[in-house]
Amino acid sequence: MPDPATIAIVLAVFVVAGTVKGTVGMGLPVVAVGLLTVAIGLHQAIVLIVVPALVANLWQLAVGGHFAYLMRRLWPFLTCTVLTIWPGTIALARVNVDWLTGLLGILLAVYALAGLTGWSFQVRRDREPLAGPAFGLATGLFVGMTGALSIPGVFFMRAIGLDRHQLVQAMGMSFFSSTAVLTACLGWQQRLPSDLALLSAVSVAPALIGMVLGAAIRARVSTKVFERLMLLALLGIGLTLMGQGLR
């Protein structure tokens, strides 16, 4: 079982990550995996995010009323994502962890910079059948190697012209399915230590507490300001992880 200091760090991270999600509507997995990797290492971070991410995104995929429409539109992307998580987890076991930590740092920095600069692109409807699988293949590999559920899948989902409510539900569908398959792959490969799995389950409570706090913050603080602060923090985390990967 992790020592008390490590447990305290993990629980505090999930309060922070839950607060981010409660305030801006997303960000729990990406914030948690970044902070946990800085604090305790990539392999442990990936295991610890699985249960809170499953619980948080189950709700997000279930509400919105667009599930059938989004499934018809996103199934090539979602299918290719889940198919490449397995080889990604194999790489996680075999590739130097410093290199993968640096890769996670790059992904977080790219995600943050895209948000801070307002960078975006558009995918025409007639190109979705090709773009969806391509983005899905890359997303699944990165999920398996780093636990980063968002990149580059979020860029694709934003590029295809979904409205705000559809986008939130689409991200929930992507994050939940990716986390479920990631958990299954790690379990099949016997890389879900019982003590970390238990701590991951316990971490649901602080994540939910953080989401409640985030909802309260959202009522009092500009969501755009908070999101910008989150992105600046993610950029700092990403640069830190890049430095760890190069040491």
Image (spheres, rainbow, N blue to C red):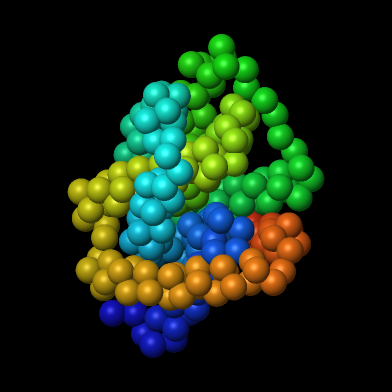
Q: What residue is drawn where x is 71% and y is 34%? A: 120
Residue 10 versus residue 229 in the image, above or below: below
Q: Position of residue 219 (x, y in %)?
A: 65, 68
- Residue 1 visible from this viewpoint: yes
Q: Seen in the image, is 113 located left or right of residue 91?
A: right
Q: Residue at x 56, y 12 (%)?
A: 126
Q: Position of residue 28 (x, y in %)?
A: 51, 60
* Nearer to the camera, 126 or 222: 222
State the residue at coordinates (22%, 68%): 194
Residue sitting nearer the eye, 227 or 90: 227
**In front: 86, or 12?**
12
Q: Is residue 38 left or right of residue 203?
A: right
| Residue ranking furthest to the front | 65
Query: Does residue 236 appear in this view?
Result: no
4 lies left or right of 20: left
Q: Quadrant of the C terminus?
A: bottom right
Q: Residue furthest top?
A: 126
Q: Residue furthest toward the bottom?
A: 4
* Left or right: 127, with 120 as reference point: left
In the figure, 228 relative to 13: above or below?
above
Tell me where residue 103 appears, x and y as whole percent. Answer: 56, 48
Q: Quadrant of the N terminus?
A: bottom left
Q: Position of residue 172 (x, y in %)?
A: 44, 46
- Whether 9 is drawn above or below 168: the answer is below
Q: Residue at x 79, y 45 (%)?
A: 117
